[in-house]
Amino acid sequence: MNKEKGDDTLNKILAIRKKRQGELKEAIASKNPEAMLVDGHDDALAGYDTKGRAIYFTDHIIGTLMQRDGMTEEEAVEFFDFNIECAYVGEFTPIYMYEE
């Protein structure tokens, strides 16, 4: 595959992903206007539960902290644990999903 075609494919995938994230955010807002979202981590949005609480992929958040913010894995995990996951903001606090 040439570079131009590869870039084109990547751009299409990113556009589809961005559209899906927007649709998820709209669905969450429609189901539960009080639902809380995690700023800066739309790419980690996995879906929502029956109460309309946002569900995030934990490993995606940690990956973003490492890539975007230049943290080591240990720093990113610690930051996530103490600043994101432990931040209770009420009944509609996001849910963080771990994958094995």
Image (tube, rainbow, N blue to C red):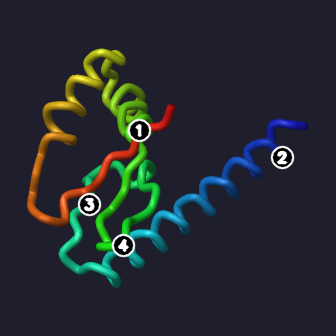
Give the quadrant of residue 15. Answer: bottom right
Q: Residue 3: horizontal and vertical position, in percent?
A: 81, 37
> What residue type is disc 2 on?
Lys
| Residue sitting farthest toward the bottom | 30
Looking at the image, is mark 3 or mark 1 nearer the viewer? 1
Q: Is residue 96 above or below residue 26?
A: above
Q: Which residue is at the far right? A: 1
Discs 2/3, front: 3
Q: What is the CA distance from the residue labelled 2 to the residue labelled 4? A: 41 Å
Q: Residues within 10 Å of mark 2 (few under 14, many from 20)?
A: few
- The type of residue carrying mark 1 is Tyr
Mark in front: 2 vs 1: 1
Label 3 CA crowd tier, 10 Å (few <14, some 14–19, many 20+): many
Residue at 75% across / 51% down in the picture? 8
Which circle's residue, 3 or 4, is located before the other in the chain? Answer: 3
In this orientation, which residue lies closer to the viewer: 55 or 2?
A: 55
Which residue position is annotated with label 3? 37
Tag 1, which secondary structure? loop
What residue is disc 1 on? 98
Task: Give whichever of 89, 14 is nearer the camera.
Answer: 89
The amino acid beneath tag 4 is: Thr
Q: Is residue 12 left or right of residue 45?
A: right
Q: Which residue is mark 4?
A: 50
| 64 horizontally vs 74: left or right | right
Which of pointers 2 and 4 indicates the residue nearer the eye? 4
